[in-house]
Amino acid sequence: MTTLADFESTGALLTGHFRLSSGRHSERYLQCARLLQWPQRAGAAGRALARALADFSPSAVVSPAMGGVIIGHEVARALSVPFAFAERQDGAFTLRRGFRVEPGASIAIVEDVFTTGRSTREVMEMIETLGAGVVAVGSIVNRGLPPDAFRVPSRSLLTVQVPSWTAEECPLCARGVSIDTPGSRWGQVES
Ligand code: ZN
């Protein structure tokens, strides 16, 4: 079971003044890497997400790098299926390092956080152009995407509504609080 308490106790739920990858400002930031640096917790999250995705019988798991790599690997381990990660090359997600998906394969795409769902949707399209199908998508955290955000079923362990504002309406900016851009500082990829 992965709960908000796990995020708090591992320092993965940060409080401050942050510029999100969307450009909006927020006083909370979820840094999944801080949770996943504990292999036991990563394994537990992977098993829980694998249970949620097992009904769709994926034959492989594919994740966008970097954010999805650890959790995708743990989900694949729990499902006893192979795992591959997609990387951006010239802006577009692609499978490198000899990774292949078989035509007709049933793929689950696994991410750490759904924020806009952009990376997941791009990997979906890439998988489909290779002739394989995406049967479901999953993440540890959903930051408020609706259930129909993807064309396939979507499962998340935790849904967290984090209030955010434009720079103009941000109360922290109004109080002159200095801002952090955790994405660039701590290496989170846009999700
Ligand atoms: Zn602000």
Image (cartoon, grey):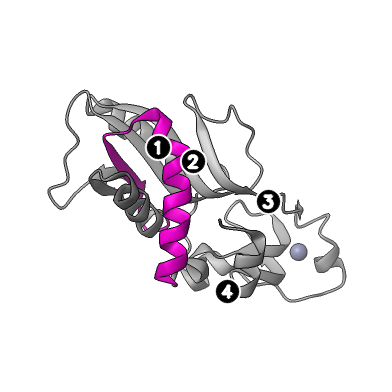
Identify the magenta region: 38-67
Specify which label sits upstream in the sequence, 3 or 4.
4
| Residue beneath the point at 44% across and 48% down | 111
Q: Identify the secondary structure beneath mark 1.
A: helix
Q: Which residue is mark 4?
A: 10
Specify which label sits upstream in the sequence, 2 or 4.
4
| Residue beneath the point at 44% across and 72% down | 38
Q: Would the CB of label 4 be found within 8 Å of ligand 1?
A: no
> In the rendered view, would you say 181 is above or below 168?
below
Q: CA distance from mark 3 to mark 1?
A: 23 Å
Specify which label sits upstream in the sequence, 4 or 1.
4
Disc number for residue 160: 3
Amino acid carrying mark 3 in the image: Val
Task: Estimate how packed mark 2 is, as few (under 14), some (14 to 19) or many (20 or more) residues with alpha carbons within 10 Å.
Answer: few
Disc number for residue 118: 2
Amino acid carrying mark 4 in the image: Thr
In percent of width and height, residue 127 lies at: 29, 32
Q: Which residue is mark 1?
A: 122
Q: Quadrant of the N terminus?
A: bottom right
Q: Identify the secondary structure beneath mark 3.
A: loop
In percent of width and height, residue 106 lies at: 29, 29
Specify which label sits upstream in the sequence, 3 or 1.
1
| Residue beneath the point at 61% across and 51% down | 22
Q: Main secondary structure of the magenta part?
A: helix
Proximity of marks 3 and 4: CB atoms separated by less than 8 Å: no
Residue 104 seen = yes
Q: CA distance from mark 3 to mark 2?
A: 18 Å
Q: Would the CB of label 1 be found within 8 Å of ligand 1?
A: no
Q: CA distance from mark 1 to mark 2?
A: 6 Å
Task: Estimate how packed mark 3 is, as few (under 14), some (14 to 19) or many (20 or more) residues with alpha carbons within 10 Å.
Answer: few
Q: Is residue 55 magenta?
A: yes
Q: Indicate the quadrant where residue 56 lies.
A: top left
